[in-house]
């Protein structure tokens, strides 16, 4: 019964988010599980339309959305050894690296793929962006 009550409350919160954000309440009490559920219920378009002047909740939901997105193996982002650009591993075969070593495959196609940096750490990259005062929304 408690799970259905929590779900009903989250549906209400999602439907009335702007009004809730205007209220003088502390939303830091929401745990990661509730943030994850809110993140799944709200689209990025809806988040963009929210007016959270005091940043009570929206940036935490953006952060959670980013975490969930990057947890998926095929959506993992890395940096190219040759050109330094960021790319998703699943798009590696579709993208051309202008500075990669060129080779020809068995079908006669010219290939110049991005090669992931072995020591590049996405977490450090994200922390660096945050240190530059970039918001989770912008990231």
Image (cartoon, grey):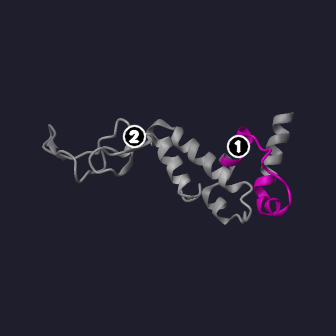
Which numbered circle lies on residue 87?
none
On the picture, is 82 further left or further right than 103? right
The Cα atoms of the two marked residues, 1 and 2, are separated by 30 Å
Q: What residue sits 73% from the left and 65% below the top?
A: 53
How many numbered marks, from 0 up? 2
Report which residue position mark 2 lands on: 120
Characterize the magenta stretch by its predominant secondary structure: helix
User: Where the N terminus falls, by quadrant?
Assistant: top right
The percent position of residue 111, horizontal first and vertical second, equals 20, 45
Residue 81: image quadrant is top left
**Mark 1 vs mark 2: which is more N-terminal?**
1
Q: Position of residue 42 (x, y in %)?
A: 67, 53
Which quadrant of the structure image shows residue 117?
top left
Q: Decide whether residue 113 is among the magenta residues.
A: no
Please tell me whether residue 134 is drawn above or below residue 91 in the rendered image. Answer: below
Q: Position of residue 77 (x, y in %)?
A: 43, 44
Residue plotted at (38% across, 48% down): 87
Outermost residue on the front side: it is 131
The tag on residue 37 is: 1
Q: Under tag 1, what secondary structure?
A: helix
Disc number lying in front (1 or 2): 2
- Seen from the viewer's position, the closer of residues 93 and 132 is 132
Density class for disc 2 (Cα within 10 Å; few <14, some 14-19, many ≥20) is few
Would you say the residues marked 1 and 2 are in contact, meaning their CB atoms lie under 8 Å apart? Answer: no
In the visual, does 129 lie left or right of 101? right
Mark 1 crowdedness (10 Å alpha carbons): few <14, some 14-19, many ≥20: some
Secondary structure type for disc 2: loop
- Residue 113 drawn at (x, y percent): 26, 45
Q: Residue at x 74, y 42 (%)?
A: 34
- Look at the image and say whether residue 34 sits in the magenta stretch: yes
Please provide the residue range marked out in magenta: 13-39
Indicate whether 33 appears above or below 94.
above
């Amino acid at each position: 019964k408690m799970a259905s009550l929590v779900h009903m409350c989250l549906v209400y919160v999602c439907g009335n988010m702007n009004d809730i954000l205007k209220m003088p309440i502390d939303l830091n009490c929401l745990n990661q599980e509730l943030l994850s559920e809110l993140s799944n219920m709200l689209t990025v378009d809806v988040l963009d339309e929210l007016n959270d002047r005091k940043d009570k909740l929206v940036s935490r939901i953006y952060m959670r959305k980013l975490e969930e997105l990057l947890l998926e193996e095929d959506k993992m982002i890395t940096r190219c050894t040759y050109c330094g650009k960021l790319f998703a591993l699943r798009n590696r075969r579709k993208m051309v690296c202008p500075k990669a070593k060129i080779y020809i495959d068995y079908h006669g196609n010219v290939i110049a793929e991005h090669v992931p940096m072995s020591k590049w750490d996405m977490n450090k990259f994200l922390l660096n962006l945050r240190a530059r005062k970039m918001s989770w929304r912008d990231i």
